[in-house]
Amino acid sequence: MKYTILALLVIVIAFASAKSSLNNEFEFLLKGHVPASNSAVLGMYEAFLQKYKGKTFEVNHDMDRFMTFKANVERIIAHNSNPERTFDMGINHLSDLTQKERLAYYNLMDPQNCSATASKRRVYNAEAPDYFNWVDQDVVSPVKDQKSCGSCWTFSTTGAIESHYKINTGEEELFSEQELIDCPDAERYDTHGCKGGLPSYAFNFIKEVGLETENSYPYLARDSVCTYDAEELRVTTDGPFNITAGDEEQLKEELFNNGPVSVSFHVKEDFLDYTSGVYSVSDCPDTEQDVNHAVLAVGYGTTDDGMDYWIVKNSWSEVWGDEGFFKIERGVNMCAIAMCNSYPLNVRKV
Ligand SMILES: *[C@@H]1O[C@H](CO)[C@@H](O)[C@H](O)[C@H]1NC(C)=O
Ligand SMILES: *[C@@H]1O[C@H](CO)[C@@H](O)[C@H](O)[C@H]1NC(C)=O
């Protein structure tokens, strides 16, 4: 009996600490319920340094970064104090960088100029339900971390391939981003490694060449030379199915009937602070020329207040956002989320 209680206690504590984040620990401060005094923000910065840099605060070295951190915290508090907001902001691994530095970290400065042509529309008998999430079907692979490289498009691609592979074969496997960074011919596929690319082109490359696993061709987070080995090939596809630009109803139908979809959109500075809720802003660029980030739509739903949203997996690690995921408003082409979307057809082993 004693042991049972002890064991339960250990489980509860382990669970609580796994769940706890700086955003929970400093919730009152970040929501503006207690004043953001210098010492209060410094306390949070010390916890930030401990968690993300494994070091303690040194006045001589860290004062400039602390000022940047504090400016970010003040912006977050102002946002979280607005009762009209649809999403919350918080701190994450990049909260000591300026807005410009954070955009540069993920190479979000250059748009990708998406211009995919639509595939022939498919017709389905089953009507898509109001809520659906492929995470509940256990076919969404873990959140990865692209680190400082504009390789979002390779993670969006592998995320889609991994989910469709599990749906089609029942097997779990992780596939290689680095092969997509190193190997496609830039002219032919319009992919540029850490400087960007589009999942639809990557699906074409995989159709023609095939994709190795994460293990056989591991991620380096930088441009490197192609070392692909034809003996190691594991997966192929018949190429992309391109959703019609602007058609979020079709996106919903295709996602429900086939699996997660690689979607692109425009990341504005304030998106980088997202932690929960439905991301929705009034002044976001929304043409196909504006997309600068590719991710993976895995589901959709509607809030109690009636706001429709997409559920999306990002590639900025699990410490970012809502354990690596986010929700973004659906049905209004929020930040061009409707403009440049595709998924891989007939994913299978080679
Ligand atoms: C996108 O278009 C802009 C303006 O036309 C151009 O400057 C930029 O180089 C293009 N980017 C890519 C990745 O093609
Ligand atoms: C989908 O888009 C890609 C490039 O973005 C293109 O190569 C492919 O031909 C398109 N597929 C269809 C069926 O239009």
Image (cartoon, rainbow, N blue to C red):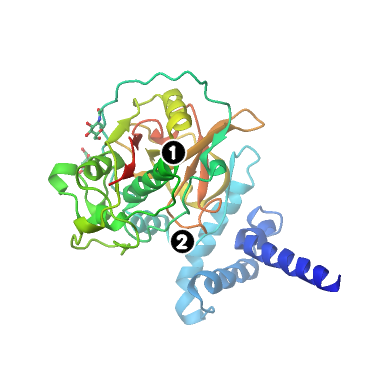
Between 109 and 324, the residue placed more toward the observer is 324
Left or right: residue 129 versus residue 297 is right
CA separation in Å, label 1 and label 2: 28 Å
Identified at 45% across, 71% down, the residue is 64
Instruction: Select label 1 or label 2 by which is in front.
Output: 1
Which SS class for mark 1?
A: loop
Q: Earlier in the sequence, mark 1 or mark 2?
A: 2
Left or right: residue 55 versus residue 236 is right
Which residue is the site of mark 1? 260
Q: Position of residue 65 (x, y in %)?
A: 46, 69
Point out the residue furthest to the left here. 187
Between 72 and 131, the residue placed more toward the observer is 131
Query: Mark 2 near ligand 1 (CB under 8 Å)?
Result: no
Q: Position of residue 84 (x, y in %)?
A: 62, 37
Which image quadrant for residue 98? bottom left
241 up-or-down from 57: above or below: above
Between 165 and 297, the residue placed more toward the observer is 165
Q: Quadrant of ligand 1?
A: top left
Left or right: residue 218 versus residue 6 is left
Identified at 25% across, 45% down, the residue is 206
Q: Amino acid at mark 1?
A: Pro
Q: Which mark is residue 94?
A: 2
Q: Amino acid at mark 2?
A: Leu
Mark 2 residue crowding within 10 angstroms, few (<14) / some (14–19) / many (20+): some
Identified at 51% across, 64% down, the residue is 69
